[in-house]
Amino acid sequence: MTTHPGTTFRHGESPDWARAVCETRSHRGATLEQLSADRPVLVVFLRHTGCVFCRESLGDLSRQRAALEAAGVGLALVHMSDPLSATLRFEQYGLGDVHRYSDRERRLYAAFGLERGKLRQVFGLRVWWRALGAILGGNWFGRWEGDGFQLPGVFLLYRGRVMMVHRAACAAERPDYVALARRGC
């Protein structure tokens, strides 16, 4: 896990960064720059939606959403699914109204510096052990949509700048989204 509160993003001046924040639009037409203009926004990059950890994250976000909003923090989701599939999945978790960005080519993931995991980071013993816990918690495997090796991450944006960075060290990490948001505010 890498968490860096109060830092600017290392690609802040790159054309990829500018396109990611200023041009990429959510399913509702807003850019990340627009979303973060008035209040901090927690941008959560998910693994593929068939992943038990992605489903666990959606459940956690659903439960923590009220606390995020009470802290004045908005929420945006980045995923690798087609938009219709994502709509159906996110509505199951009560997140259908959250701004989401379909990034099947993983351009946003790359612009934010999120890497593909190595075999150990995606299928290692720790990952399997955590997967068992996620399954026992009611998060089943689903249809694989996206790159199964893509690692997740969480960023807090405010006025188009990154205030907090959390890049997962493996697929099995389960961040406390409220704590990450507070760390970056």
Image (tube, rainbow, N blue to C red):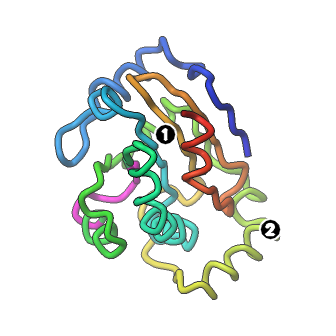
Disc 1 marks which amino acid? Tyr
**Quadrant in which the C terminus is drawn:** top right
56 or 61, which lies in front? 61
Residue underneath mark 2: 126
Disc 2 marks which amino acid? Arg
Name of the residue lying farthest toward the right = 125
Which range of residues does the magenta coloring cover?
Answer: 77-85
**Pointer 1 or 2: first along the chain:** 1
Instruction: State which quadrant residue 83 falls in.
Output: bottom left
Q: Residue at x 77, y 76 (%)?
A: 129
Residue 54 drawn at (x, y percent): 51, 65
Up the image or down, 184 lies above or below 159; here it is: below
Residue underneath mark 1: 109
Q: Residue at x 78, y 59 (%)?
A: 120
Residue 31 drawn at (x, y percent): 27, 32
- Disc 1 is placed on an element classified as helix
Q: Residue at x 31, y 29 (%)?
A: 38
Q: Residue at x 47, y 14 (%)?
A: 14
Left or right relative to 144: residue 56? right
The residues tagged by marks 1 and 2 sit, at their Cα atoms, a distance apart of 24 Å
126 within the magenta span: no
